[in-house]
Amino acid sequence: MCGQVGIIFGKKRRRIAEREYLNEVFIRMLLSSERRGPHASGVALLQTDGQFRLFKRPFRAHRIVRDPAFDEVLDEVNNHTTVLMGHTRWRTRGSEANSRNNHPIRAGSIIGTHNGTIYNADQLFCRFQLPRYAEVDSELIFRLADCFDSERGWNDAGFRKALRLCRGQMSAVLASRFNPGVITVLKGNKPLTLRYSRKCRAVLYASEAVFIDSALDDRRGWQDLEIPQLTMLTFNHENLKEWKQQPFDFICQERKGTLPHGVIA
């Protein structure tokens, strides 16, 4: 069980007060999600030119938000930011002392976070001959995404096809340094709540709705996005309100050792 929180930004000329408000909402969501992941936490942001900042430590969220490096990341949120990602990790595989295992994870051109477990990650790393930077299974999702990303564009059809081979649980958020204006959200069989504000031109997301509720002073103006499981959402920074929604599939397995009917290990 891990916590994902973040903000997807649409194109807008925001005043300083609005940027500060959204930063505060992000911090509150991250702190609320600590109970889902007490072993490590991290944050990443991506700009329209592909520049990014990534900061993660084997600390609880309440500790990481007091680190000057955390403030430096949030200070860079501006009118060119496309996404601000946060993650609180519940350690399963891979020590949190090695920050390569903590989220957000960078895999080639891809930066992302994941909640869940991919039980056949080792086999798929071998099958696709993917490089491996960390010990965690989550890295597989972002390595697969990197295979279908280039300066020429993002092949979401190829990525969705590759995801069908994954077995376990997932919800994830990812973005590309090559295509920083496109943010992909995978709502699989792990919880993920999204809310959109036309006024702020922003989407908030969190592993639990209460994390958003506790962060907002006033819910008015924030619209729930009713997204079914096994849905891939694609948000575009240039026109956030016209997001793309399409199904994706993988082998859903709630517990290790208990295979879905008809699946052979």
Image: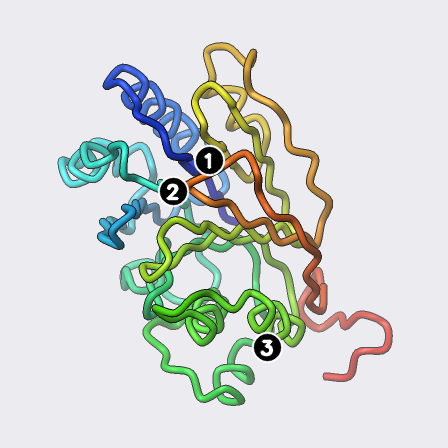
Task: Tell me whether the residue at label 2 lies in contact with that at label 3, contact meaning CB atoms closer than 8 angstroms.
Answer: no
Q: Who's the residue at 63% across and 27% down the image?
A: 224
Q: Who's the residue at 40% across and 35% down the image?
A: 9
Q: Is residue 159 above or below residue 229?
A: below
Could you say where residue 112 lies in the image, as x and y percent from the top left?
41, 56
Q: Which mark is residue 120?
A: 3
Q: Mark 1 and mark 3: span between their CA atoms?
A: 27 Å
Task: Tell me whether the residue at label 1 lies in contact with that at label 2, contact meaning CB atoms closer than 8 angstroms.
Answer: yes
Residue under circle 1?
Answer: 33
Could you say where residue 31 lies in the image, as x and y percent from the top left?
39, 30
Q: Amino acid at mark 3?
A: Asn
Identify the element where label 2 is drawn. strand
Residue under circle 2?
Answer: 86
The disc, 1 or 3, on the residue closer to the chain's N-terminal end is 1
Identify the element where label 1 is drawn. helix
Q: Who's the residue at 47% across and 73% down the image?
A: 148
Front: mark 1 or 2 = 2
Front: mark 2 or 3 = 2
Q: Is residue 210 above or below residue 44?
A: above
Q: Amino acid at mark 1?
A: Ser
